[in-house]
Image: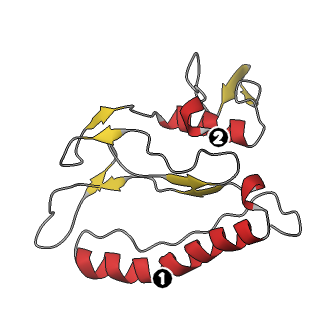
Amino acid sequence: VQRGVRYVNLFHGGWDAHGGLEANVKNNSKVVDQPVAALIKDLKQRDMLDSTLVVWGTEFGRTPLAQGKDGRDHHPAAYTIWMAGGGSRAGMTYGKTDELGWSIEENPLHINDFQATLLHLFGIDDKRLVHRFKGLDFRLTGVGDSGRVVKELIA
C-alpha cells in the first residue's frame, strides 16, 4: 500500500464451523485479531487510513442457533461486515437484527447497495461501470435502480 498498490486482498479461511465452534472461533480470532489491529494502527500512524479503505467481510453469517452438538450453519440473512478508513464513517452501526440475530429489523442492506457504496468510496460511479455482454450492459450492482449508495456509511 505504501508503494501505491491500489488493491490488496487478504483471505483467511477456516471459519466454516459446522462443528467445534468454540475452538474454531477462538483459534481463528487469535490468528487475525492482532494483525488486523496492527494494520489499522499502522495505516493511521502513517497517515494512510483516510485514503485506504479496509473492509472485513464474509459471504454469509452463522445461524444464531446451534447445529448439531457444537456447530452453526450458514446464515445469509443477517451478518456483519465492517469497514475502517477510506472515507467510511467511523464508530457507527448500520442495521439491526432481532434479539436472536435471525432476522433484520432495521436498515436492511442489499449487497448491491453495499457494492455501490464501496465503488463510490473508490471514486467509481457504479452506474457507469458496465460490462457489455450480448448487446446488454451489465453492472456489478445489478440492473434498474439497484445499487444505491448508502450515504450513512460515508464520512
Provide residue 151's location: percent of width, then percent of height. Answer: 59, 30
Q: Nearer the viewer, residue 155 or 12?
A: 155
Residue 150 visible (yes or no)? no
Quarter of the image where one finds residue 98: top left
What amino acid type is highlighted by mark number 1?
Val
Q: Identify whether 36 is placed above or below 84.
A: below
Provide residue 62's location: percent of width, then percent of height. Answer: 29, 57
Question: Which type of secondary structure does the marked residue at label 2 adopt?
Answer: loop
What amino acid type is highlighted by mark number 2?
Ala
**Residue displayed at 19% across by 46% down:** 99
The C terminus: image quadrant: top right
Question: Real-space Cα distance between discs 1 and 2?
Answer: 30 Å
Q: Local crowd at mark 2 within 10 Å, few (<14), some, or many (≥20)?
A: few
Q: Is residue 77 left or right of residue 102?
A: right
The N terminus: image quadrant: bottom right
Most extreme residue toward the top, as rendered?
144
Q: Is residue 5 left or right of residue 91?
A: right
Name the residue that disc number 2 marks.
155
Provide residue 96's location: percent of width, then percent of height. Answer: 32, 40
Name the residue that disc number 1 marks.
31
**Residue displayed at 15% across by 57% down:** 65
Are the two marked residues, 1 and 2, in contact with CB atoms closer than 8 angstroms? no
The mark nearer the N terminus, 1 or 2, is 1
Q: Is residue 45 left or right of residue 101?
A: right
Provide residue 40's location: percent of width, then percent of height. Answer: 64, 68
Residue 89 visible (yes or no)? yes
Q: Nearer the viewer, residue 108 or 126?
A: 108
Most extreme residue toward the left, as rendered?
69
Question: Which type of secondary structure does the marked residue at label 1 adopt?
Answer: helix
Q: Identify whether 86 is placed above or below 114.
A: below
